[in-house]
Amino acid sequence: DRAVRHRDRDRQRGPADDGCRHHGPFGSFGFRPASINDNGDVAFLANLDDFPPTTGIFVGPRVVQDRVIETGDKLDGARVTGLRLCEEGLNDVGELAFIADLADPSAPNGFRTAVFRFSSALCGQGDGQA
């Protein structure tokens, strides 16, 4: 019987492999592919597994240590409300370009969008500057 075979298969795979569950801090990943440079360094956009979801840019699997920036952070004197990263955003010296939407009461319409550069986090040369 087909239903019995599926049930037995699901029991063998176990709950971690049932296709519906995930484990770890990331709830989902950005629509665009990750950015990978010629050195094999990677940067990616992801939503954390929280509610409402926090969106961030990360350079590895550790949420705190590998975080570049996330929504809610202050950047250029304003609060980050959205982030975008494209697959060409990371160069071979570890500089990362991204777009941030900022809630800025001093802007004419209360928000602005800007391109930022984050550097040196991937090269182990100290803390990067956004």
Image (cartoon, rainbow, N blue to C red):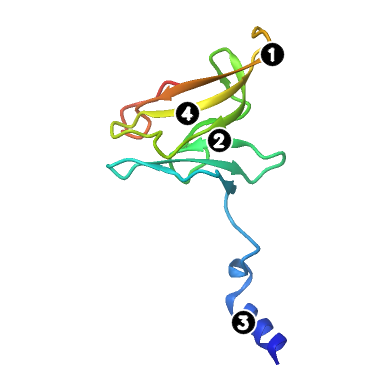
Q: Is residue 7 left or right of residue 113?
A: right
Q: CA distance from mark 3 to mark 2?
A: 36 Å
CB atoms of marks 1 and 4 within 8 Å:
no
The amino acid at mark 3 is Arg
Callout 1: few (<14), some (14-19), or many (20+) C-alpha neighbours within 10 Å? few
Residue at disc 4, secondary structure: strand
> Residue 112, how many percent across, how many down?
60, 17
Name the residue at the bottom extreme: 1
Q: Quadrant of the C terminus?
A: top left
The amino acid at mark 4 is Phe
Residue to which mark 1 is pinned: 110
Q: CA distance from mark 1 to mark 4?
A: 21 Å
Q: Nearer the viewer, mark 4 or mark 2?
A: 4
Residue to which mark 3 is pinned: 9
Identify the residue at horizontal 64%, vertical 9% (top origin).
107
Q: CA distance from mark 3 to mark 4?
A: 43 Å
> Residue 97, how many percent across, how many down?
42, 28
Residue to which mark 4 is pinned: 98
The amino acid at mark 2 is Gly
Residue at disc 3, secondary structure: helix
Q: CA distance from mark 1 to mark 2?
A: 22 Å
Q: On residue 56, which mark appears?
A: 2
Q: CA distance from mark 3 to mark 1?
A: 54 Å
